[in-house]
Image (cartoon, coloured by chain):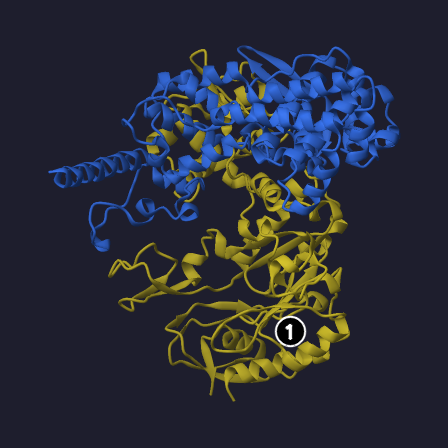
Chain colours: A yellow, B blue
Amino acid sequence: MSNYTYLRRLFQAYYQEKQFEFPKVSSFDLREFGLIPWEKKVYMKRHMSFDNPDVLRSYLITDAPRHLYSSGSLYLKPDAPDMNKKEYQGCDFIIDIDVDHFYTPCKDQHDLWICKECGNDGTGIPQTCPNCKSSKFTKVSWVCDQCLDAAKNEITKLISNFLIPDFGIDEKKMKIAFSGHRGYHLKIESEDIRKLNSEERREIVDYVSGKNINFEILGLNERFNGIYGLLEENIGWSQKIMKKIIEVLNKPTKQIEALLLDKNHFGFNSSVVTSFLKYKNDFLELITKGERNVWAIEGFGLTNWKKLLKGIVALIGIELDEPVSIDIHRLIRYPGSLHGKTGFKVQELELNELDDFNPLDESNEKLDPIVFKSKKNLTYKLEIVENKLPITTIKGESFGPYDKGDKIDVPHHFAVFLLCKEVAKTI
Amino acid sequence: MSIPTDLVNRYPWLPSLKLQYSDIADKVPSEFISDLFSKNDSKQTSERVLLIFETAFNNLEDIPNPKDENLSIQVYILLKILVYALNNKLITNRIANLYSKNAYRKMERDNSESDLYNICLDLKLRVNFYDPPIQYGNKMLKDTREKQATNFTIYYIDYLKLASNLRDEYRKLAHNSLQNGYVYIQNRNLMRLIQEYVRNKILIKETEDKASLKSFLDKAFKIQEFKELHDHILSIWAKKEEDFDFTFKLDLTSKTDIMKLYPPCVLEILKKAKEGQNLVHHERLFIVWFLLALGYPVENVVDIFATLPDFDRDKTIYQVEYAKKKKYTPYQCSTLQSISLCKKEKYKDKLCLEGYGSFEPSEKKKLKHPLFYVQIKQYRDEYLKKKEDKKLERVNQ
């Protein structure tokens, strides 16, 4: 039996077993559905609709696709093949946070690349192959607690630093879900927000990500032979930036130094950092107690201040996948469905469940996205087909690292994960 | 909640017009025209409407103050009917920009917070009104902090609906104070958003339903006064229309149509300006720097912006002169691409898409700067002209 056939049967069995617990999205009959079947050639079948959840359930039990999606938009004719004929009614605001789109240090350990030109391989994602300078790679992206925590941290920041205090969005209108792989989705369902067009959505995206902020407009400018900075009392991004600067300046000097030198954060050179550290206490006093607010640090002109503020904004802003939020015709993973690249469930979460949620080792069974655990502790024999695989820690147990050709005997849930990732085959 | 009748008289574009003056506002257009021109004051209304059109066609920014404000409702309705009847995008944009700008100036002159609040309520804008004003920050003025306070906050959805089309960096949500779903907004900025509402209300797309338009015109033209007014406006427009084409007098290339030398990124901005659409900050900067680099006089550059909804001649002159003094270089192609102003795909421009320097595609060089586009086009034109002249010479010999 091929891997696809085996996995499809597993998915069918899951949908059969969970058919009475399968969630129903709001305005179900107005949503467009899409799916990716279990086929070698990856393609998405779109423009589908289901009259009610029962029809969807029976479809899943029969067909069990590899991935299942539904639209953020509502249409009077969701199955019309032409987007212009769907009779668009509005779209929820969708935020996708996926560690694929931002840097986490753990990726240097577990994300693999293989050069398509010379076959060289390694971890982390380089710009070019160190051996042949080609920029064409096969990438194997992996999951670990650390990067999933980073994604969770972003979604928590988004809710508690932006959506609730700034936008005043009621938490009951937010639908949060673990994506089943490397991130989280957040959907805001409100009549008001559904009316926004892409241009207006971009404004919200820019606000929460801090992209395209003009520091001069916020108050940074050179006048009367001095540089005037931002003010903490100014509600909005000025206040956020100033609070973060104060938070950073109150850290131990060694930590500040490392942050300012770090190329993935501020990327200042050592002489600028030395100068900044020398005056940091004066600067802290000025911005917390001072009246004049003239930012004077030796070696710091407007360019370096802007660089510093840019780095601060990056610490505050949310790392989200912008096109997902702006595009009103996107499909997102259906809650409760299975992710074909991991076999994990797309798990809906209440806001109060988010903090303790641990997708790779969840103790609350109702929230556990790892659904293929064997009740009888059965193991499965597989052969590794990918060049190298990193250590994987799932359900508190570590597996690997593995090399191509390794024959392994692993628990069912981990076997499903490797098969879905297409890095192993059954033997 | 109903708003004072007087407010509808002064601001006839308010939705309450339909409630408080349903006898006028609910009439079908042809019936309205028929009634209007049977009244004694119809001449005054016609003159007032004509004045608005003339002001717009002369590219002026202020409609002279009306003698009688009681006619404002008839004027507004007749204006909208004429805009529909004329069915010309350029005229519509021009009228929408002028009329809405004057609505802004009127709110500014009336300077009443309670009027402004009532206008917002009538427009169903979700605003909070604070009296005394609420503080949301400070502004540094040399050594002192000046309190920043306002009477109004507006719900962010309503703010975005009106502000996102303004394309002004200062109105970007991230540059404003947002708290609990409400944006702190200065009275004048709120008026500017309302101006945009008024502009959108007059902006009706050129109708494609020619049959309905024809049927309306057949009925309306039976009323002699309306037909005369319509035709008179068209005759003024016919004389003025060419003023709105960007044919600069500057002799840059001798006998060459200068527009043919512009790259698509420039043509697109000029087209938008001509139609009276809002321009984003980068578009404004780029077109100023580009035209100044080609040696256009400041006044010609300023005139390009005269059609824009937020045009302020004095401010624009100052900014263009400042840019000239600083000698800024226009954005290069890569920058234009990164800020989505490159229009080579939209215009399918061969020179931008394929490059220059060789007939062999693999040997062509990529165009890097829009000014270089002008130079190459100029060179090619002259080369072709010389070739043509030689041919003619040979034929004549």
- Near mark 1 (Cα within 10 A), the count class, few <14, some 14-19 or many ≥20, is some
Residue shown at the point (31%, 33%) measured from the top left: B371
Is A113 displayed left or right of B19 in the figure?
left
The percent position of residue B67, horizontal first and vertical second, equals 74, 10
- The residue at the far left in this view is B397
Q: Is residue A295 above or below residue A165?
A: above
The percent position of residue A237, horizontal first and vertical second, equals 59, 32
Residue shown at the point (72%, 60%) measured from the top left: A76
Residue under circle 1?
A371
The percent position of residue B112, horizontal first and vertical second, equals 77, 15
**Disc 1 secondary structure class:** loop
Nearest the eye: B148 or A297: B148
Nearest the eye: A134 or B348: B348
Residue shown at the point (35%, 56%) measured from the top left: A126
Q: Amino acid at mark 1?
A: Val
Query: Is any part of residue B159 visible from this angle?
Result: no
Q: Is residue A425 above or below residue B132?
A: below
Q: Chain of mark 1?
A: A
Query: Is any part of residue A51 visible from this angle?
Result: yes
Residue shown at the point (39%, 58%) measured from the top left: A124
Nearest the eye: B148 or A402: B148
The percent position of residue A371, horizontal first and vertical second, equals 64, 73
Is A392 displayed left or right of A325 in the figure?
left
Is B12 displayed left or right of B61 in the figure?
right
Count of numbered labels shown in the rendering: 1
